[in-house]
Image: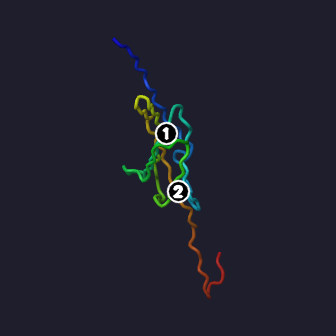
Amino acid sequence: SARFTVSELPTPSRPVVTSPASGEDIDMTGRRNLVFTWQPVDGADFYDIALYVEGSGSPILRKTGITGTRYALNNLRILDVGNFILSIRARSEYEDVGVTRSSPRLRVPFSLSVNIADTAPTILTDELQYAE
C-alpha cells in the first residue's frame, strides 16, 4: 500500500500595524490620502484589510490580495471625522495543494479629525474696521 505524509501547513502570524497607531487621532486637514502600513509577516503572500466605522458591522472599505505592506486610501469621500477600526490579516497560499491559511485579524482603533478654526472669522464692516 502507498504511504504518504501530510505536513502541517503553517498559518501566518498576525500582522503588526505601524500606522495608524492604536488610539491615534489623525488630523486630516489638507491631506489627500490616508496611508495604512504594517510590518511584513514571514510566509505571508497577501494581506487583506477592511475599514469600519466604529460600531458598524459592514466595512466602508475592503481590499484583499495586497502584496506589499502599505495601502493608500485616496478616496477620502468615504470618510468622515470620527472613530474607525482598521482590520488586517495575513494570508499564505499553498497553490500546489490549493490551501490558504489566514492569520487572526488584528483590529486597530483610530480616529480622524479636521482642524477647524476655534473662532468664527470676523466680518469687517463700515462700523468694524479691525479684528483681533
Residue 124 at what x, y percent from top left? 61, 82
Name which residue lies at 52% across and 41% down. Answer: 67
Tell me which residue sits at (51%, 55%) in the image: 112
Q: Is residue 4 above or below residue 61?
A: above
Q: Quadrant of residue 127?
A: bottom right
Q: Nearer the viewer, residue 8 or 81?
A: 8
Quadrant, the N terminus:
top left
Residue in front for this viewpoint, 7 or 132 = 7
Q: Give the spatial CA distance, label 1 vs label 2.
A: 21 Å
Instruction: Pick the quarter of the image with the C terminus.
Output: bottom right
Dot 1 crowding, Cα within 10 Å, few <14, some 14–19, many 20+: some
Amino acid of disc 2: Asn
Percent x, y for residue 118? Answer: 57, 67
Identify residue for label 2.
74
**Where residue 78 sits: x, y (%)?**
46, 58
Label 1 vs label 2, nearer the camera: 1
Q: By what rule are the colours in the image chosen?
A: rainbow
Q: Residue furthest bottom?
A: 126
Pick out the residue farthest to the top: 1
x and y, in percent, of residue 51 in the image: 45, 49
Q: Residue at x 53, y 58 (%)?
A: 113
Whether 51 is drawn above or below 128: the answer is above
| Callout 2 secondary element | loop
As shown in the figure, which amino acid type bears the numbered disc 1? Phe
Query: Considering depth in this image, is 39 or 5 the residue closer to the camera?
Result: 5
Q: Residues within 10 Å of mark 2 (few under 14, many from 20)?
A: few
Using the image, determine if residue 116 lies above or below residue 107. Answer: below
**122 to the left or right of 54:** right
Number of numbered markers = 2
Farthest front residue in view: 1
Q: Which residue is mark 1?
A: 46
Q: Residue at x 55, y 37 (%)?
A: 40
